[in-house]
Image (tube, rainbow, N blue to C red):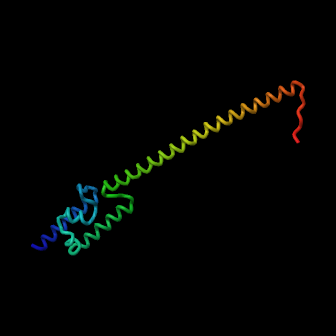
Amino acid sequence: MASERHTQAEARIRAAMEQLLGGDIPEGLRCDIKSLSILSRVPRATLYRTYPHLKQEFEQRLGRVRETGGEPDPRVQIDRLTEDVARLRGRIARMSQELSEAEDFRTTALSRLAAQHEEIVSLRRELSDTTARGLRMVPPR
């Protein structure tokens, strides 16, 4: 009788392990030992004392999944992606602001260059008119 209960509990733990590692995580639970004990209906203390090999197997498999860049709990991945999107949107906003400032600077610089060009052309015209009237330029000292 006790061995049958032990076998049934071990089967429930393995089934819960597969469910959690497969990404089928019920609302309010996570992919962890506490959730494993809740899903398998085996108290956590019993899991630690009687089934440490299953607890260790679960932790090792979970570690291997995470090492390969995976995450059994899609909510964790969604949270991470949401944070990435927020960070990237902030970066886009900063880059848009910098671009706007650069465009404003370019417009101002071009305007100033055009004004300086007009002034140079005007001064050359004035100089040309002065020399055309027969006035001689005095060289700078």
Apparent side of residue 36 relative to residue 78 in the rendered image (left or right): left
Q: Residue at x 68, y 36 (%)?
A: 113
Give the x, y percent position of residue 124: 79, 30
Vertical order, 88 against 140 (above or below): below
Apparent side of residue 101 relative to residue 11 in the rendered image (left or right): right
- Image quarter (top left, top right, bottom left or bottom right) of the C terminus: top right
- Image quarter (top left, top right, bottom left or bottom right) of the N terminus: bottom left
Quarter where residue 98 is shown? top right
Q: Residue at x 13, y 73 (%)?
A: 3
Vertical order, 27 against 50 (above or below): above
Nearest the eye: 100 or 123: 123
Give the x, y percent position of residue 137: 88, 33
The outermost residue toward the left is: 1
The outermost residue toward the top is: 133
Give the x, y percent position of residue 19: 24, 59
**How many numbered discs sit on the rendered protein?**
0
The outermost residue toward the bottom is: 49
Nearest the eye: 52 or 38: 38
Give the x, y percent position of residue 115: 69, 33
Nearest the eye: 22 or 119: 119
Q: Residue at x 80, y 28 (%)?
A: 126
Nearest the eye: 62 or 106: 106
Apparent side of residue 32 relative to residue 89 in the rendered image (left or right): left
Quarter where residue 55 is shown? bottom left
Vertical order, 7 against 117 (above or below): below
